[in-house]
Amino acid sequence: MATSTLWSALAVASPSAPIALEGETVAQLLTLQALIGNDTDPVSDGWLESDACAVRLLSGVLLYRREPNKYRNALFAELVVDDYAERSAGKYNDIYVEEAVSVMDAASSVPREITDQRIRMVAGFCALKDKNLWTTAGNGSRLSLARFFRGAALSSLLKGTDEDTVAITSAIDAHTASRHDSVAP
């Protein structure tokens, strides 16, 4: 896929292309990166108010690991993929399987100093969550690229806990779908 076509695919369903991670966002993600896998050091709940989806989501997961009941709603709000209105209108932004890898790679790009692959998955989810991008598997079923990143990021970040990431994402999708007509989660 040509670069301009790649960015067109990423920009679908949104007036702006994915926002590059830079400056303060990178600094915050580097701080959060050091806290992944460390459930004892404090995480600032102020990061839940960040302008950057990746910072809100990553801090939400880390806070949720420490206090699930307190941070459940904050985390779950960041995990919403609300493409149900488009889908009920029959609109899916389909890309070929061959293009999906390039699109996902571009969506999950982060500055070199961020080395944790889980942050790449979070960045990929944030870049794609509002794009309604889908690819078709060999058996004919559709795969949402945003939901793929969401599941991969969440399960890797909640590894070692008793949390069922499939149940979490299914509940979020069911709740989101219930606000719309005619599309199953």
Image (cartoon, rainbow, N blue to C red):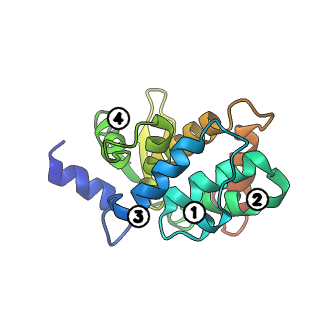
**Residue 65 location, quadrant:** top right
Task: Point out the tag, 4 or 1, that comes first from the N-terminus.
Answer: 1
Which amino acid type corresponds to the residue marked 1 in the rendered image?
Answer: Asp
Q: Secondary structure at mark 2?
A: helix
User: What residue occupies the far front of the structure in this picture?
Assistant: 41
Mark 4 → mark 1, Cα distance in angstroms: 22 Å
Q: Is residue 58 left or right of residue 77?
A: left
Residue 132 in view in this figure: no
Q: Is residue 162 left or right of residue 83?
A: right
Looking at marks 2 and 1 on the same chain, the residue that comes earlier in the sequence is marked by: 2
Q: CA distance from mark 3 to mark 4?
A: 35 Å
Q: Position of residue 154 (x, y in %)?
A: 62, 42
Where does label 4 land, which residue?
Answer: 97
Q: Which mark is residue 163?
A: none
Residue 75 vertical position relative to residue 48 in the rendered view, above or below: above
* Neighbours of disc 1 within 10 Å: few (<14), some (14-19), many (20+): some
Q: Which residue is mark 2?
A: 71
Local crowd at mark 2 within 10 Å, few (<14), some, or many (≥20)?
some
Which badge, 3 or 4, comes first in the chain's sequence?
Answer: 3
Specify the label residue 24 is tagged with. Answer: 3
Judged by depth in the image, the label closer to the viewer, 2 or 3, is: 3
Q: CA distance from mark 1 to mark 3?
A: 27 Å
The numbered dot on residue 82 is 1
Please state which amino acid type lies under the numbered disc 2: Tyr
Mark 2 and mark 1: Cα distance apart in space: 21 Å
| Lateral position of residue 65 relative to residue 147, left or right | right
Q: Secondary structure at mark 4?
A: helix
